């Protein structure tokens, strides 16, 4: 029998020293979640979130007045985040260089919340190997009218097709409507090759089952189908990070799950910002251990 899991370490030291102002401001009016609650959530899950979201370029969904008011998507540094939010210079298509943001600790996550952040999105590559993705993401977007069961079946289908290519994948509830199928990669191939693989793979699935899947952006073609959004897999694109909160009703979060658990889950918004303790406990459980981790390279398609 496997050894018991080590008990979570009790620590008296706070994981963050960043001051959060207006802690009582309601960010999720419908569910009574305040800015302080959100900061506490991110501080609590920082240990399980940062292995996925830390040390890579991030974009933030900021809603300073709460999720029901104006929100904006921020890719670049605009100053005023403080010392805990770091900058990584990245070459843009036009040859210029821009500073992108990254965090590497709980202070960084909380400093972003202090600046009105609800959601954390990230690149598929880390600062250490910016041109070589360490993660492929297939974002399954069901058309209105399809239910979560259809999305789960589709995710399983991707899992099986990837397995036939020798690739291990992991499901993540987006916290919104869909499921992301995540394929961890050894950073080896560069963006154009990875994008090409994602494109071919998605088109092959849609070609084999055109009634069920679509791999092109065109909204008109999505009717009653599941859009396999492979476009997360190009340089500069982002996907929502594991454990990020979502700026949606009910304060849901993006949550990694195991394939076997997924079968019994009925919504992509299964967990929320009130469930930090449960998410931490789950992360050490069999089935989730090793989630999102695998040393593998893409085959030729
Ligand atoms: P759902 O399951 O509800 O689809 P999702 O996170 O997959 O949730 P999508 O709309 O499918 O949401 O994906 C949008 C993706 O596009 C996000 O993951 C985000 O990283 C990226 N993105 C790029 N630009 C923006 C923007 N301006 N606003 C929001 N997201 C953006
Ligand atoms: Mn999606
Ligand atoms: Mn999408």
Image: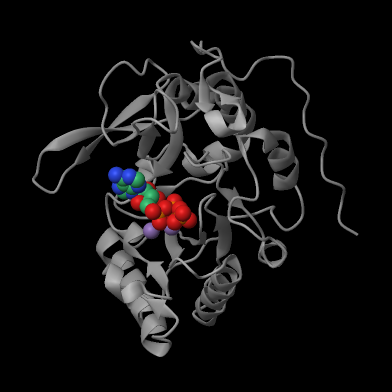
**In x, y percent, where is residue 14?**
65, 15
**Quadrant in which residue 243 is drawn:** top right
Report the coloring of the rendering.
one colour
Residue at 29% across, 52% down = 131
- Using the image as rendered, state which of residue 257 and residue 134 is in the foreground: 257
**Looking at the image, which residue sits at the far right?**
1
The residue sitting at 50% across, 26% down in the picture is 27
Q: Is residue 281 above or below residue 263?
A: above
Measured along the vertical axis of the image, is residue 94 above or below residue 173?
A: above
Q: Looking at the rendering, in which quadrant would you find the N terminus?
A: bottom right
Residue 164 in the image: above or below residue 228: below
Q: Residue furthest bottom?
A: 208
What residue lies at 42% left-to-right and 78% top-to-bottom?
A: 213
Position of residue 66 measured from the top left corner of the image (x, y, whole percent): 44, 27
Residue 37 visible in the shown view: yes
Q: Looking at the image, can residue 293 be seen? A: no
Residue 204, image x and y in percent? 37, 83
Quadrant holding the C terminus: bottom left
Residue 30 location in percent, x, y? 56, 33
At 49% across and 69% down in the image, what residue appears? Answer: 145
User: In the depicted view, which residue is nearer to us: 52 or 114?
Assistant: 114
């Amino acid at each position: 029998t496997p050894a018991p899991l080590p008990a979570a370490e009790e620590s008296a030291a706070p994981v963050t020293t960043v001051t959060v102002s207006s802690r009582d401001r309601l960010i999720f009016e419908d569910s009574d979640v305040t800015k302080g609650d959100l900061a506490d959530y991110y501080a609590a899950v920082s240990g399980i979130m940062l292995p996925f979201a830390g040390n890579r370029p991030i974009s933030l969904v900021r809603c300073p007045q709460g999720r029901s008011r104006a929100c904006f998507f921020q890719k670049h540094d605009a100053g005023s985040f403080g010392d805990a939010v770091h900058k990584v210079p990245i070459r843009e298509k036009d040859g210029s260089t821009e500073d992108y943001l990254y965090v590497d600790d709980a202070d960084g996550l909380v400093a972003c919340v202090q600046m009105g952040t609800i959601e954390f999105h990230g690149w598929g590559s880390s600062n250490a190997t910016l041109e070589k993705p360490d993660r492929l993401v297939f974002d399954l977007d069901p058309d209105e009218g399809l239910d979560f069961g259809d999305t789960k079946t589709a995710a399983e289908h991707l899992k099986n097709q990837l397995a036939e290519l020798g690739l291990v994948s992991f499901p993540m509830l987006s916290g919104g409507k869909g499921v992301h199928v995540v394929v961890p990669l050894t950073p080896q191939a560069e963006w154009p090759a990875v994008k090409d693989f994602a494109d071919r793979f998605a088109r092959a699935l849609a070609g084999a089952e055109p009634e069920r899947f679509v791999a092109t952006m065109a909204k008109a073609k999505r009717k009653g189908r599941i859009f396999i959004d492979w476009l997360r897999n190009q340089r500069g694109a982002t996907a929502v990070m594991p454990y990020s909160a979502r700026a949606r009703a009910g304060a849901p979060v993006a949550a990694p799950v195991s394939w076997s658990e997924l079968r019994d889950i009925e919504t992509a918004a299964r967990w929320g910002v009130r469930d930090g303790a449960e998410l931490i406990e789950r992360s050490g459980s069999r089935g989730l251990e090793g989630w999102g981790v695998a040393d593998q390279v893409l085959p030729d398609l």
